Image (tube, rainbow, N blue to C red):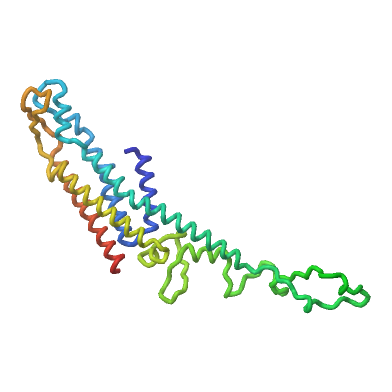
């Protein structure tokens, strides 16, 4: 994977960090540090000579290639890269839905705020001041256009701050973008990017709870599937040699694997990381349901 691909995925995951619970932030940290960094830095260096150093005790052309294909149908590093992409997909889809929903809610609140703005008020004819002496009588001129008067106090200076009970449009929009607060029903504006979530209550207030739980369930199912697939493909140990009898090998040949102990340790570490991520998913679901 190129550096551009890793940086793009990292930026997406950082944005997901703004729309997650505390347990979700811990899961994201484990994913970035122990999966992306380990796979990009450690895994690619350990497995860089995986095929070139895979040698068999025969000179038959093509025997090394077919035996390596039998030993590793899918490279460990490519398997883990595919695992990272697939497991991150539900969170990326949730992020797209959350951003779309919050942007639409902010736009609707902005329109409501514009409609609540004080407009011009028409004075009834009975409240109009009498004309000065000498002016012609306007009673026979038919229905005249009433005088417009603003609901603003003439004593207020332009640009004066609004009263404590009035909110500007920007403040109202910020309130909607950062809904949350205590149990007294008041809206509290929290610092940080618009739409940032700090826990279960805020996700529930924004109407994202069902989607968030759904992506957790899908993510946990992917974790289990990849754990089973990793065990079926590689087991728990990388053997130091491999007996191969595939064609065009003339007979059963012994093939030797480079760095078997180091690869075994790395394989076990990835098992532990997968189990930890699965445990965090289950803890987050329990936190959202019973929290």
Give the residue displayed 17% in from the left and 36% down from the top.
72
Q: Can residue 110 be seen in this view?
A: yes
Instruction: Return the residue found at the far left.
Output: 252
Q: Quadrant of residue 168?
A: bottom right
Q: x%, y% of residue 249?
A: 10, 24
Q: x%, y% of residue 116?
A: 60, 68
- Apparent side of residue 267 relative to residue 139 in the rendered image (left or right): left
Q: x%, y% of residue 291?
A: 30, 69
Question: How many marks do you count on the picture?
Answer: 0
Q: Is residue 273 visible?
A: no
Q: x%, y% of residue 187?
A: 47, 71
Q: Which of 173 and 149 is in front in this view?
A: 149
Is 131 drawn above or below residue 261 in the view shown? below
Give the residue displayed 58% in from the left and 72% down from the top.
166
Is 277 drawn above or below residue 84 in the view shown? below
Q: Quadrant of residue 47?
A: top left
- Apparent side of residue 263 relative to residue 165 in the rendered image (left or right): left
């Amino acid at each position: 994977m190129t550096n551009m691909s890793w940086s793009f995925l990292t930026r997406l995951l950082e944005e997901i960090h703004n729309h997650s619970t505390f347990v979700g932030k811990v899961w994201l940290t484990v994913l970035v540090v122990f999966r992306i960094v380990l796979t990009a830095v450690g895994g690619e260096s350990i497995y860089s000579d995986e095929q070139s150093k895979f040698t068999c005790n025969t000179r038959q052309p093509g025997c090394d290639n077919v035996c390596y294909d039998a030993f590793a149908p899918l490279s460990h590093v490519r398997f883990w890269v595919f695992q990272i992409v697939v497991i991150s997909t539900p969170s990326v889809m949730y992020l797209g839905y959350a951003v779309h929903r919050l942007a639409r809610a902010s736009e609707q609140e902005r329109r409501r705020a514009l409609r609540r703005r004080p407009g011009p008020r028409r004075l009834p004819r009975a409240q109009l001041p009498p004309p000065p002496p000498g002016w012609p009588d306007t009673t026979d001129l038919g229905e005249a256009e009433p005088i417009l008067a603003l609901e603003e106090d003439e004593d207020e200076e332009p640009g004066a701050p609004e009263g404590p009970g009035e909110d500007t449009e920007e403040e109202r929009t910020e309130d909607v973008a950062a809904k949350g607060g205590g149990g007294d029903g008041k809206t509290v504006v929290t610092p940080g990017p618009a739409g940032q979530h700090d826990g279960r209550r805020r996700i529930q207030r924004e109407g994202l709870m069902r989607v968030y739980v759904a992506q957790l369930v899908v993510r946990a199912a992917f974790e289990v599937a990849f754990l089973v697939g990793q065990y079926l493909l590689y087991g728990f140990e990388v053997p130091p040699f491999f007996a191969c009898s595939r064609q065009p090998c003339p007979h059963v040949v012994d093939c030797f694997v480079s760095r078997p102990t180091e690869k075994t340790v790395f394989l076990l570490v990835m098992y532990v990381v997968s189990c930890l991520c699965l445990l965090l998913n289950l803890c987050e679901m329990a936190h959202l349901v019973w929290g």
